[in-house]
Image (cartoon, rainbow, N blue to C red):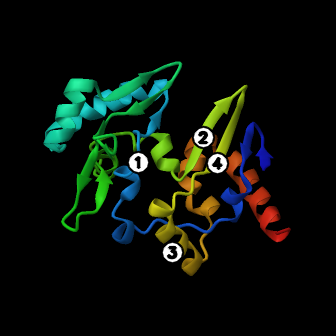
Amino acid sequence: MFKVRNTILSDDIATAQFACDLPRCKGACCVVGDAGAPVSKDEIPVLHKAYRVLKDELLPESVEVAEREGVVIGSERAGYEISTVKSEECIFVQYDENEVAYCAIQKAYFEGRFNWEKPISCHLFPVRLKHIAGFDYANFEYVPRLCSVACEKGENENTYLAEFLEKPLVRRYGKEWYNEFIESCKSLRDNK
């Protein structure tokens, strides 16, 4: 473990090689699992807005779940997560012509139709954050079924997870934090 300001990170965030390979994994992180993506209380109103904007573009099963159970489920005590179809597929999933799953919110963001890219937990995946006693704890949530092709691509391209996640880490913590983080990662790699 290493620390950057008020964030404690697992060493593998610095040392693992990782680069998403959507054509091969087919967007599995959006459709495989036993729960929806964790979201913060602050993100809930934005997700409701995204649902209203994108409802007509979502899959019928997703709309049915959102109307029946809500866009977000959970509680402040237990935590919040995006609703899913059959406890797996995120309600915001869409598919391209090659059956690759992608985020409808992110697509709308890239097209300039929505001003928010996606929940931070989705943006940071496969890193998961837990906030405890004033600290963020960050862990690389390696799931072979989801991450193995990305790790293989990262090794082939010599891309580290830490660098691959620059954009969401800067979004979450800021550029100064990220610069300190990268220095710590490089030091950890050099001493490995």
SS class of the residue under badge 1? loop
Look at mark 1 in the image and give the residue it sits on.
33
Which of 51/61 is in front?
61
Which of 115/94 is in front?
94
Q: Nearer the viewer, mark 2 or mark 1?
A: 1
Of the two numbered discs 4 and 2 on the same chain, state the one appearing first in sequence.
2
Distance from Cα at disc 4 to Cα at disc 2: 7 Å
Q: Amino acid at mark 1?
A: Gly
Q: Residue at x 29, y 57 (%)?
A: 101
Q: Amino acid at mark 3?
A: Lys
Look at mark 3 in the image and give the residue it sits on.
153
Q: Amino acid at mark 4?
A: Asn
- In this view, the residue farthest toward the bottom is 156
Q: Nearer the viewer, mark 1 or mark 4?
A: 1
Look at mark 2 in the image and give the residue it sits on.
129
Distance from Cα at disc 2 to Cα at disc 1: 17 Å
Residue 152 vs 103, above or below: the answer is below
Crowd band around label 4 with a 10 angstrom C-alpha radius: few (<14), some (14–19), many (20+): some
SS class of the residue under badge 4? strand
Horizontal and vertical percent position of residue 104: 28, 47
Q: Residue at x 35, y 31 (%)?
A: 47
Q: Amino acid at mark 2?
A: Leu
Residue 28 vs 37, above or below: the answer is below
